[in-house]
Amino acid sequence: MRYAKRGRARFSSHRDVARTMEWTLRRAGVPVALSHGFSPHPRLSWIGAAPTGAASEAEYLEIGVTEHLDPELVAREVDAALPAGLAVIEVVVAGPGALADRIDASAWLIETPGVPDERLAPAIEAFLAAPEVVVERVTKNGPRPLDVRAAVAEPGLTLTRTDEPQDADRQDRAPAATCGRLTAVVRHTTPAARPDDVCSALRDVAGLEFPEPVRATRWAQGRLDERGELIDPLLADRAAPTA
């Protein structure tokens, strides 16, 4: 399943989303399989969940089921039962192989209210010219250095005019003249480089300050090809014959 996290739902944690999805699948009547062992739990596998505070058009979930289902029917029933801000985009029957093996990067749209494109451009140039840009990421095991420059895939950061999805907060967005927009294709490193790490890197390398919180939306996940483009992780499943 590919699903979206929009509007105020972007402030939901992954745990909140996971609990909501489990409840929704039960309400929609999806026969979810259970794991084996002393304490069985639903067979749900979450792939690279977006961080709290970020919106996403490309969240992925693998669902183990006990019988063959019509994916279009599952998509309709689950989408109808989800709360506002969460939406099913597509459901397909899984083919061979793990979905996680088809995803190693994300494409992000980062909006910067109060920092227009003309101020973003020189900071992006400085970032791309640097051999490395290391920021400190606080993890559960303590601070860890993260080379954001190495995590950002070629062609790196680019300014964009691609508009974001029409969500519940659209009326609160800053005008385009005062809000820059950049696209970042980021590899799934350990620890993962997030949109706020990209902004920290721009601050460190070019002294760029952000007067308002940035807004990040993940547009896609997939495996990077030799051209630096993301391959749709559900492409092979759509092409496979169904039983």
Image (cartoon, rainbow, N blue to C red):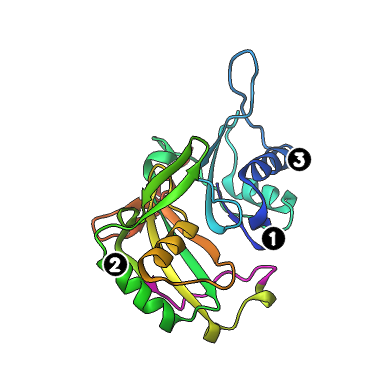
Write down the region rendered in magenta.
158-169
Taken as a whole, is the magenta stretch helix, strand or loop?
loop
Mark 3 secondary-structure assignment: helix
Coordinates of residue 97 in the picture (x, y in percent): 39, 35
x 49%, y 67%: residue: 110
Mark 2 secondary-structure assignment: helix
Which of pointers 1 and 2 lies earlier in the amino acid sequence?
1
Q: Is residue 133 magenta?
A: no
Q: In the visual, does 21 lie left or right of 230?
A: right
Q: At label 2, which amino acid type do we have?
A: Leu
Q: At label 1, which amino acid type do we have?
A: Arg
Mark 1, residue position: 8
Coordinates of residue 212 in the picture (x, y in percent): 59, 71
Mark 2, residue position: 128
Residue 30 to residue 13: above or below: above
Q: Nearer the viewer, mark 1 or mark 2?
A: 2
Mark 1 secondary-structure assignment: helix
CA gap between label 3 and label 2 equals 48 Å
Mark 3, residue position: 27
Coordinates of residue 184 in the picture (x, y in percent): 40, 63
Of 160 and 26, the residue lying toward us: 160
CA gap between label 1 and label 2 equals 33 Å
Q: At label 3, which amino acid type do we have?
A: Arg
Q: Nearer the viewer, mark 1 or mark 3?
A: 1
Q: Is residue 166 magenta?
A: yes
Coordinates of residue 51 in the picture (x, y in percent): 55, 51
x 68%, y 75%: residue: 172
Does residue 103 show up? Answer: no
Dot 1: within a 10 Å radius of its alpha carbon, few (fewer than 14), some, or many (20 or more) residues?
some
